[in-house]
Image (cartoon, grey):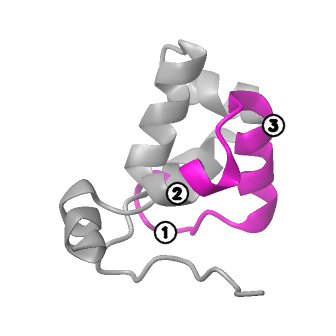
Amino acid sequence: MSLLKMPDASVYDPNRVLDAIIARLKLKNDAALSRALEVAPPVISKIRHNALPIGATILLRMHEVSDFSIRELRALMVRADAREGLLA
């Protein structure tokens, strides 16, 4: 059994995850996302500005409300241009 690691800081992009969930749930903004995830608005802001990583608890909550799989959410954490380089 292999353990999955968080993406390297050089390729980590939490905005892709947040934007994907907002789109999936048809939310208006980060404030609506914070209500959907049942977290305080500053938590979303800190994640978006790379001041707070997406931890296990919020990752599970994102999975629960969005129906994205954990694998999909983790894949969204990697910048699109970096992901292509990782897959090559």
Badge 2 is on which residue? 47
Q: Residue furthest bottom?
A: 2
In the image, what residue type sits under mark 1? Ala
Of 38 and 18, nearer the camera is 18
Up/down of 74 relative to 64, above or below: below
Relative to residue 12, is residue 88 drawn left or right? left
**Which label number is shown at residue 51?**
1
N-term-proximal mark, 3 vs 2: 2
Identify the secondary structure beneath mark 1: loop
Q: Identify the image quadrant of residue 36.
A: top right
In the image, what residue type sits under mark 2? Ile
**Which label number is shown at residue 64?**
3
Of 80 and 18, nearer the camera is 80
CB under 8 Å between discs 1 and 2 = yes
Relative to residue 26, is residue 84 drawn left or right? left
Identify the secondary structure beneath mark 3: helix
Residue at image coords 70%, 87%:
2
